[in-house]
Image: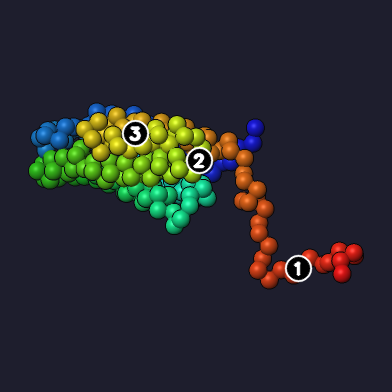
Amino acid sequence: MNLRWPPLTGVVFVILIVISFILSGETPDFDDTGEEVISFYTDNEGSQMVSAVLGAYAALFFIFFASLLRAELRRNEEGPGVLSTISFAGAVVFAVGGLAFAGFTFTLADLADESPDPGAMQALNALNGEFFFPVAVGMGAFLLGAGIATIRGGVLSTWIGWAAVVIGVLAVTPAGFFAFLAGLAWVLVVSIMLAREPESPAAATPPPSPGAAPPPPSPGAP
Protein backbone atom coordinates (compact mmCIF):
# COMPACT_ATOMS: atom_id res chain seq x y z
CA MET A 1 0.00 0.00 0.00
CA ASN A 2 1.43 3.37 -1.03
CA LEU A 3 1.15 6.21 1.44
CA ARG A 4 1.29 9.94 0.92
CA TRP A 5 3.55 11.00 3.76
CA PRO A 6 2.76 14.74 4.15
CA PRO A 7 -0.76 14.15 5.58
CA LEU A 8 0.81 12.08 8.36
CA THR A 9 1.88 15.35 9.96
CA GLY A 10 -1.49 15.04 11.70
CA VAL A 11 -0.35 11.78 13.30
CA VAL A 12 2.89 13.44 14.43
CA PHE A 13 0.85 16.29 15.93
CA VAL A 14 -1.28 13.91 17.99
CA ILE A 15 1.74 11.91 19.19
CA LEU A 16 3.58 15.06 20.30
CA ILE A 17 0.51 16.39 22.13
CA VAL A 18 0.01 13.11 23.99
CA ILE A 19 3.68 12.94 25.05
CA SER A 20 3.55 16.60 26.09
CA PHE A 21 0.51 15.96 28.27
CA ILE A 22 2.13 12.90 29.88
CA LEU A 23 5.30 14.82 30.71
CA SER A 24 3.35 17.78 32.03
CA GLY A 25 1.45 15.69 34.56
CA GLU A 26 -0.82 17.32 37.13
CA THR A 27 0.21 20.97 37.29
CA PRO A 28 -0.82 23.37 40.10
CA ASP A 29 -4.42 24.56 40.19
CA PHE A 30 -5.16 28.13 39.20
CA ASP A 31 -5.94 29.05 42.80
CA ASP A 32 -2.79 27.56 44.35
CA THR A 33 -0.48 29.97 46.16
CA GLY A 34 2.57 31.45 44.49
CA GLU A 35 4.86 29.49 46.79
CA GLU A 36 3.20 26.22 45.77
CA VAL A 37 3.58 27.14 42.12
CA ILE A 38 7.26 27.96 42.56
CA SER A 39 7.88 24.71 44.45
CA PHE A 40 6.22 22.60 41.75
CA TYR A 41 8.06 24.15 38.81
CA THR A 42 11.38 24.11 40.66
CA ASP A 43 11.04 20.38 41.30
CA ASN A 44 9.80 19.63 37.75
CA GLU A 45 11.71 22.17 35.68
CA GLY A 46 13.13 19.72 33.13
CA SER A 47 9.94 17.80 32.39
CA GLN A 48 7.89 21.00 32.11
CA MET A 49 10.35 22.57 29.68
CA VAL A 50 10.40 19.47 27.50
CA SER A 51 6.60 19.34 27.62
CA ALA A 52 6.42 22.97 26.47
CA VAL A 53 8.87 22.45 23.61
CA LEU A 54 6.99 19.35 22.39
CA GLY A 55 3.74 21.32 22.55
CA ALA A 56 5.28 24.03 20.39
CA TYR A 57 6.44 21.49 17.80
CA ALA A 58 2.97 19.94 17.87
CA ALA A 59 1.51 23.31 16.85
CA LEU A 60 3.97 23.46 13.94
CA PHE A 61 2.98 20.02 12.64
CA PHE A 62 -0.70 20.86 13.10
CA ILE A 63 -0.36 23.90 10.83
CA PHE A 64 1.20 21.69 8.15
CA PHE A 65 -1.65 19.18 8.48
CA ALA A 66 -4.33 21.89 8.42
CA SER A 67 -2.79 23.36 5.26
CA LEU A 68 -2.90 20.00 3.50
CA LEU A 69 -6.47 19.41 4.67
CA ARG A 70 -7.50 22.85 3.40
CA ALA A 71 -6.06 22.04 -0.04
CA GLU A 72 -7.98 18.75 -0.11
CA LEU A 73 -11.24 20.42 0.93
CA ARG A 74 -10.75 23.31 -1.52
CA ARG A 75 -10.40 20.97 -4.50
CA ASN A 76 -13.92 19.67 -3.82
CA GLU A 77 -15.54 22.94 -2.73
CA GLU A 78 -17.56 25.12 -5.06
CA GLY A 79 -17.39 28.90 -5.02
CA PRO A 80 -14.74 31.01 -3.30
CA GLY A 81 -13.80 28.33 -0.75
CA VAL A 82 -15.24 29.95 2.36
CA LEU A 83 -15.57 26.76 4.40
CA SER A 84 -12.03 25.51 3.78
CA THR A 85 -10.76 28.99 4.64
CA ILE A 86 -12.74 29.03 7.90
CA SER A 87 -11.28 25.64 8.78
CA PHE A 88 -7.71 26.81 8.19
CA ALA A 89 -8.31 30.07 10.06
CA GLY A 90 -9.59 28.06 13.02
CA ALA A 91 -6.49 25.87 12.84
CA VAL A 92 -4.26 28.94 13.06
CA VAL A 93 -6.19 30.27 16.08
CA PHE A 94 -5.94 26.83 17.72
CA ALA A 95 -2.19 26.71 17.09
CA VAL A 96 -1.73 30.18 18.59
CA GLY A 97 -3.66 29.07 21.68
CA GLY A 98 -1.50 25.97 21.99
CA LEU A 99 1.67 28.05 21.64
CA ALA A 100 0.40 30.36 24.39
CA PHE A 101 0.06 27.40 26.76
CA ALA A 102 3.53 26.19 25.78
CA GLY A 103 4.94 29.66 26.35
CA PHE A 104 3.33 30.01 29.78
CA THR A 105 4.63 26.59 30.85
CA PHE A 106 8.17 27.25 29.63
CA THR A 107 8.24 30.64 31.36
CA LEU A 108 7.01 29.19 34.66
CA ALA A 109 9.66 26.47 34.58
CA ASP A 110 12.42 28.85 33.55
CA LEU A 111 11.67 31.45 36.25
CA ALA A 112 10.91 29.12 39.15
CA ASP A 113 14.51 28.93 40.42
CA GLU A 114 15.22 32.65 39.90
CA SER A 115 13.52 33.82 43.13
CA PRO A 116 10.51 35.23 41.29
CA ASP A 117 7.68 37.20 42.85
CA PRO A 118 5.12 34.67 44.16
CA GLY A 119 2.21 36.86 43.08
CA ALA A 120 3.52 37.04 39.51
CA MET A 121 4.02 33.29 39.40
CA GLN A 122 0.50 32.73 40.74
CA ALA A 123 -0.94 35.00 38.04
CA LEU A 124 1.09 33.30 35.30
CA ASN A 125 -0.03 29.90 36.56
CA ALA A 126 -3.66 31.04 36.47
CA LEU A 127 -3.23 32.05 32.82
CA ASN A 128 -1.59 28.71 32.11
CA GLY A 129 -4.65 26.94 33.48
CA GLU A 130 -7.47 29.16 32.25
CA PHE A 131 -6.35 30.64 28.90
CA PHE A 132 -8.40 28.15 26.89
CA PHE A 133 -10.63 30.35 24.71
CA PRO A 134 -8.26 30.44 21.68
CA VAL A 135 -7.93 26.65 21.79
CA ALA A 136 -11.68 26.08 22.14
CA VAL A 137 -12.77 28.59 19.49
CA GLY A 138 -9.96 27.56 17.14
CA MET A 139 -10.84 23.88 17.42
CA GLY A 140 -14.52 24.66 16.92
CA ALA A 141 -13.96 26.72 13.77
CA PHE A 142 -11.44 24.23 12.39
CA LEU A 143 -13.78 21.27 12.77
CA LEU A 144 -17.01 23.03 11.78
CA GLY A 145 -15.48 24.41 8.58
CA ALA A 146 -13.87 21.08 7.71
CA GLY A 147 -16.99 19.09 8.62
CA ILE A 148 -19.45 21.12 6.55
CA ALA A 149 -17.03 21.26 3.62
CA THR A 150 -16.61 17.48 3.82
CA ILE A 151 -20.37 16.86 3.81
CA ARG A 152 -21.02 19.24 0.92
CA GLY A 153 -17.99 18.30 -1.18
CA GLY A 154 -18.12 14.55 -0.76
CA VAL A 155 -14.44 14.37 0.19
CA LEU A 156 -13.25 11.64 2.57
CA SER A 157 -16.48 10.27 4.11
CA THR A 158 -19.80 11.72 5.19
CA TRP A 159 -19.54 10.31 8.71
CA ILE A 160 -16.18 12.06 9.12
CA GLY A 161 -17.91 15.33 8.23
CA TRP A 162 -20.76 14.84 10.69
CA ALA A 163 -18.34 13.80 13.43
CA ALA A 164 -16.40 17.02 12.86
CA VAL A 165 -19.58 19.11 13.09
CA VAL A 166 -20.65 17.48 16.38
CA ILE A 167 -17.18 17.81 17.94
CA GLY A 168 -16.86 21.38 16.66
CA VAL A 169 -20.11 22.40 18.35
CA LEU A 170 -19.09 20.70 21.62
CA ALA A 171 -15.70 22.43 21.54
CA VAL A 172 -17.26 25.75 22.61
CA THR A 173 -19.40 24.26 25.40
CA PRO A 174 -18.53 23.16 28.97
CA ALA A 175 -17.69 19.77 27.43
CA GLY A 176 -14.79 21.44 25.60
CA PHE A 177 -12.05 19.28 27.14
CA PHE A 178 -13.74 16.07 25.98
CA ALA A 179 -14.31 17.67 22.57
CA PHE A 180 -10.59 18.45 22.46
CA LEU A 181 -9.76 14.78 23.04
CA ALA A 182 -12.30 13.76 20.38
CA GLY A 183 -10.76 16.35 18.05
CA LEU A 184 -7.35 14.70 18.46
CA ALA A 185 -8.90 11.37 17.49
CA TRP A 186 -10.56 13.02 14.48
CA VAL A 187 -7.26 14.48 13.29
CA LEU A 188 -5.59 11.09 13.71
CA VAL A 189 -8.24 9.31 11.63
CA VAL A 190 -8.36 11.96 8.90
CA SER A 191 -4.57 12.09 8.69
CA ILE A 192 -4.43 8.35 8.01
CA MET A 193 -7.33 8.55 5.53
CA LEU A 194 -5.61 11.30 3.56
CA ALA A 195 -2.32 9.40 3.57
CA ARG A 196 -4.00 6.30 2.13
CA GLU A 197 -5.83 8.15 -0.64
CA PRO A 198 -4.25 7.78 -4.09
CA GLU A 199 -2.96 10.99 -5.56
CA SER A 200 -5.48 12.51 -7.95
CA PRO A 201 -4.55 12.53 -11.66
CA ALA A 202 -4.84 16.30 -11.72
CA ALA A 203 -2.24 16.57 -8.98
CA ALA A 204 -0.01 13.85 -10.40
CA THR A 205 0.13 15.25 -13.98
CA PRO A 206 1.23 18.88 -14.16
CA PRO A 207 -0.67 21.05 -16.64
CA PRO A 208 1.17 22.24 -19.76
CA SER A 209 2.95 25.57 -19.43
CA PRO A 210 1.17 28.58 -20.97
CA GLY A 211 3.87 28.97 -23.61
CA ALA A 212 3.91 25.36 -24.74
CA ALA A 213 3.56 24.82 -28.48
CA PRO A 214 0.41 23.04 -29.72
CA PRO A 215 0.88 19.42 -30.79
CA PRO A 216 1.62 18.91 -34.50
CA PRO A 217 -1.32 17.93 -36.70
CA SER A 218 -1.76 14.28 -37.57
CA PRO A 219 -0.73 13.21 -41.10
CA GLY A 220 -4.33 12.83 -42.23
CA ALA A 221 -5.46 16.24 -41.01
CA PRO A 222 -6.49 18.78 -43.72
Image side of residue 55 versus residue 211, left or right: left
* Neighbours of disc 3 within 10 Å: few (<14), some (14-19), many (20+): some
Image side of residue 120 versus residue 165, left or right: left
Q: Residue at x 40, y 42 (%)?
A: 148
Residue 141 image position (x, y, % from top left)? 33, 45
> Is there CB contact under 8 Å for labels 1 and 3?
no
Identify residue for label 3: 166
Q: Residue at x 25, y 31 (%)?
A: 175
- State the separation of the CA atoms marked 3 and 2: 18 Å
The tally of labels here is 3
Q: The residue tagged with tag 1: helix, strand or loop?
A: loop
* Neighbours of disc 1 within 10 Å: few (<14), some (14-19), many (20+): few
Residue kind at label 1, given as amino acid type: Pro
Q: Between residues 41 and 143, which one lies in front from this camera angle? A: 143
Decide: is 36 above or below 63: above
Residue kind at label 2, given as amino acid type: Gly
Q: Quadrant of residue 128?
A: top left
Residue 195 image position (x, y, % from top left)? 55, 38
Q: The residue tagged with tag 2: helix, strand or loop?
A: loop
Is residue 91 visible from the viewing direction of this image? Answer: no
Q: Earlier in the sequence, mark 1 or mark 3?
A: 3
Decide: is 174 above or below 91: above
Q: Earlier in the sequence, mark 3 or mark 2?
A: 2
Identify residue for label 2: 154
Q: Residue at x 64, y 36 (%)?
A: 2
Residue 100 image position (x, y, % from top left)? 27, 46
Identify residue for label 1: 214
Is residue 73 visible from the viewing direction of this image? Answer: yes
Q: Quadrant of residue 111?
A: top left
Q: Earlier in the sequence, mark 2 or mark 1?
A: 2
